[in-house]
């Protein structure tokens, strides 16, 4: 398994990537196409394609944040699921030598409970913070997520830094940046 960085939306594979992206996540967890294209111009943002031999299996989209990687979106084509690509990708990210941070839905339904278990089996731990994800689209509302990290839980200071990174960097590539109402959920001490 190898990861290959897609360097721009002009890549001929982008259309298929976008289809998998839209099919893999609820609409409120996705950027608009124009915002995704803008995000891909930011050097801190990585869109890595997952390959096994010459077969494209999925993608991982992550940010190089100060002192850690933030995994924003991660998906495998249905035909590649259950073959260990998810664990291999997480191992590849961990081998880059920095902590890894990601978010999952609260473990309330079978699929979200299984997802949490998958990340725990890969060494991630849930953090105790009451986290609301800023909406990508201007008409959506914040939604609760669980922050998971590897190799250990994060401090309050790192958590607050993550929230600032979300506000100041990640969400600059969203419709929501035009709606100041969501900033009310980001109250800092």
Image (cartoon, grey):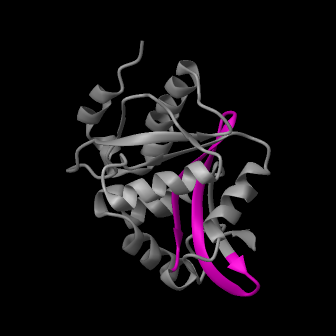
Read off the magenta span.
Answer: 51-77
Can residue 31 be seen at all in this image of the molecule?
no
- Characterize the magenta stretch by its predominant secondary structure: strand
- Location of residue 24 in the rendering, given as x and y in whole percent from the top left corner: 41, 70
Quarter of the picture holding the N terminus: bottom right
So how many labels did they put on this image?
0
- Location of residue 157 in the rendering, given as x and y in whole percent from the top left corner: 56, 19
Q: Is 8 left, or right, of 94 in this rendering? A: left
Quarter of the picture holding the C terminus: top left
Question: Considering depth in this image, is 72 or 150 the residue closer to the camera?
Answer: 150
Q: Is 175 left, or right, of 98 in this rendering? A: left
Residue 60 lies in the magenta-colored region? yes
The quadrant holding residue 47 is: bottom right
Residue 171 lies in the magenta-colored region? no
Q: Which residue corresponds to the image point at 28% horizontal and 35% vertical from the top-left?
A: 182
Q: Is 42 left, or right, of 129 in this rendering? A: right
Q: Note whether 81 is above or below 152 in the view shown.
A: below
Q: Which residue corresponds to the image point at 76% horizontal and 85% vertical from the top-left?
A: 53
- Location of residue 180 in the rendering, given as x and y in whole percent from the top left corner: 27, 34
Can residue 81 be seen at all in this image of the molecule?
yes
Question: Considering depth in this image, is 23 or 164 the residue closer to the camera?
Answer: 23
Q: Which residue corresponds to the image point at 72% horizontal and 81% vertical from the top-left?
A: 52
- Location of residue 161 in the rendering, given as x and y in whole percent from the top left corner: 54, 26
Question: Considering depth in this image, is 161 or 105 the residue closer to the camera?
Answer: 105
């Amino acid at each position: 398994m190898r990861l290959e960085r897609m360097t721009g939306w002009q890549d001929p594979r982008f259309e298929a990537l976008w289809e998998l992206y839209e099919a893999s996540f609820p609409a409120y967890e996705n950027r608009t196409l124009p915002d995704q294209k803008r995000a891909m111009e930011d050097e801190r943002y990585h869109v890595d394609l997952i390959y096994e031999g010459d077969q494209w299996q999925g993608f991982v989209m992550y940010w190089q944040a100060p002192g850690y990687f933030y995994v924003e979106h991660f998906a495998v084509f249905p035909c590649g699921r259950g073959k260990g690509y998810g664990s291999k990708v997480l191992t590849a990210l961990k081998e880059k030598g920095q902590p890894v941070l990601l978010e999952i839905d609260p473990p309330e339904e079978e699929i979200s409970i299984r997802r949490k278990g998958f990340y725990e089996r890969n060494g991630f731990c849930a953090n105790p913070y009451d986290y609301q994800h800023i909406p990508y689209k201007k008409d959506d509302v914040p939604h609760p997520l669980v922050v998971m990290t590897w190799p250990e839980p994060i401090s309050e200071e790192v958590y607050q830094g993550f929230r600032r990174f979300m506000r100041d960097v990640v969400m600059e590539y969203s419709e929501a940046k035009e709606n100041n109402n969501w900033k009310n959920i980001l109250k800092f001490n």
